[in-house]
């Protein structure tokens, strides 16, 4: 595909964002595109709302995999694009339309001119929520086509087009969602002694949770516990019977995440005792750290620079990515692709520059052919 064709595919996909494990239109679009390619070397397997596509190598000794996530986010689009989302309240606000387009552009080139090794394209659903990487890894389809190496990219709004960034070791943090429900006894505001106030209990929990990182985590380590949403009560003159906290936890070490959960649960026991209430905790989606295999870094840097692009060593980030589960089992790496947007990821005004599509295809294709 030339740059205009890449733009068309990206815009088609941008119009139809779908949430995790609901990507039926997206899967159908991907299948239709793939069916239009030369089929001599291609095999396709469906997995839930995703796809596994294998390109047979000319003299294979291994399989190289490339992963592209395919789901959108529950975000209202505010880009003003003439090709804006047609699905109300849903948007490709994390660049997965770019990720898929780059994968399809690379797949087209390999279908026309295969490389020596087998190549596996993973169109993975539900990266944002609830997490599709781990169940895809565990699927029979994946086990049948298990790769020897794997890599992926993520768009980077903060980097200019033509810049690629990554690093050896930790790139993305361990992450966990956090949902805490409080159940007490409601009543009239004039009779607080007859109630068990869950707004008060949730408020005290929130304040005490701020001490977890500052007093339980090694100062030389990095971790985050954030309560981003509090709900409770129904009327201004009633004492709340229930309350709910929603938040997130992040850490650079896997065992630090275990420590955070232990402290979250211990704090809940104390609040339960002091407020005579019941507390339940749900960790929602948990993502494992993205840790790049250092053996790929120097060769990858040479690939980027030989193509005439700029390679930058990035810093580790507290963001989460379920690609970490794949890197836990398969040697590989992830990199940032510069797209130069004034607005960041998960923002309704994210507008990555489409010139980055061809950069992405060039880098991914050359990497596949070189690994």
Image (cartoon, rainbow, N blue to C red):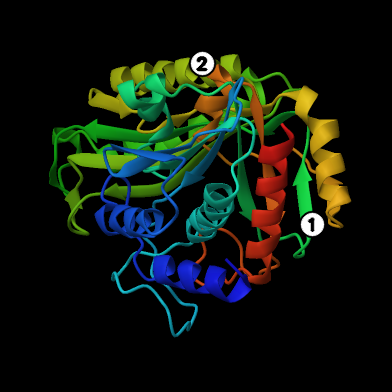
Query: Which dot, 2 or 1, sits closer to the camera?
Result: 1
Residue at 51% x, 16% y: name it: 258
Residue 274, picture quadrant: top left
Question: Which percent across, then down, holds residue 133?
Answer: 43, 32
Q: Nearer the viewer, residue 336 or 303?
A: 303
For the N terminus, the quadrant is bottom right
Vertical order, 24 against 226 (above or below): below
176 left or right of 32? right
Which element carries disc 1, helix, strand or loop? strand
Q: Mark 2 points at which residue?
A: 258
Which element carries disc 2, helix, strand or loop? helix
41 left or right of 66? left
Q: Mark 1 points at which residue?
A: 163
The reply to whether callout 2 and callout 1 are in contact (CB within 8 Å) is no
Residue 330, picture quadrant: top right
Question: Which percent across, then down, holds residue 64?
Answer: 59, 30
């Amino acid at each position: 595909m030339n740059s205009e064709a890449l733009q068309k595919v990206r815009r088609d996909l941008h119009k139809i964002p779908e949430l995790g494990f609901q990507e039926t239109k997206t899967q159908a679009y991907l299948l239709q595109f793939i069916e239009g390619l030369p089929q001599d070397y291609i095999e396709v397997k469906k997995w839930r709302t995703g796809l596994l596509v294998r390109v047979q190598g000319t003299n294979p000794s291994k399989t190289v995999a490339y992963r592209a996530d395919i789901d959108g986010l529950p975000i209202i689009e505010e880009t003003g694009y003439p090709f804006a989302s047609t699905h109300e309240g849903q948007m490709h606000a994390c660049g997965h339309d770019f990720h898929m387009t780059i994968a399809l552009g690379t797949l087209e080139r390999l279908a026309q001119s295969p490389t020596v090794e087998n190549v596996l394209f993973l169109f993975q659903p539900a990266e944002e929520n609830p997490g599709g990487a781990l169940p895809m890894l565990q699927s029979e389809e994946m086990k049948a086509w298990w790769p020897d190496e794997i890599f992926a990219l993520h768009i980077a709004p903060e980097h200019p087009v033509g810049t690629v960034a990554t690093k050896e070791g930790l790139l993305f943090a361990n992450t966990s969602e956090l949902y805490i429900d409080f159940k007490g006894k409601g009543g009239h505001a004039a009779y607080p002694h007859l109630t068990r106030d869950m707004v008060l209990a949730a408020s005290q929990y929130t304040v005490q949770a701020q001490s977890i990182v500052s007093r339980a985590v090694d100062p030389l380590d990095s971790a985050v516990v954030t309560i981003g949403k509090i709900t409770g009560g129904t009327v201004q003159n009633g004492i709340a019977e229930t309350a709910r906290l929603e938040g997130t936890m992040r850490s650079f070490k896997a065992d630090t995440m275990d420590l955070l959960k232990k402290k979250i649960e211990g704090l809940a026991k104390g609040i339960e005792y002091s407020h005579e209430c019941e507390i339940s905790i749900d960790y929602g989606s948990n993502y494992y750290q993205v840790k790049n295999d250092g053996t790929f870094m120097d060769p990858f840097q040479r690939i980027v620079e030989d193509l005439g692009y700029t390679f930058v060593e990035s810093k580790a980030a507290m963001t989460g990515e379920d690609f970490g589960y794949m890197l836990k089992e398969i040697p590989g790496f992830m990199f940032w692709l510069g797209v130069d947007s004034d607005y960041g990821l998960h923002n309704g005004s994210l507008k990555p520059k489409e010139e980055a599509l061809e950069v992405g295809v060039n880098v991914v294709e050359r990497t596949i052919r070189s690994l």
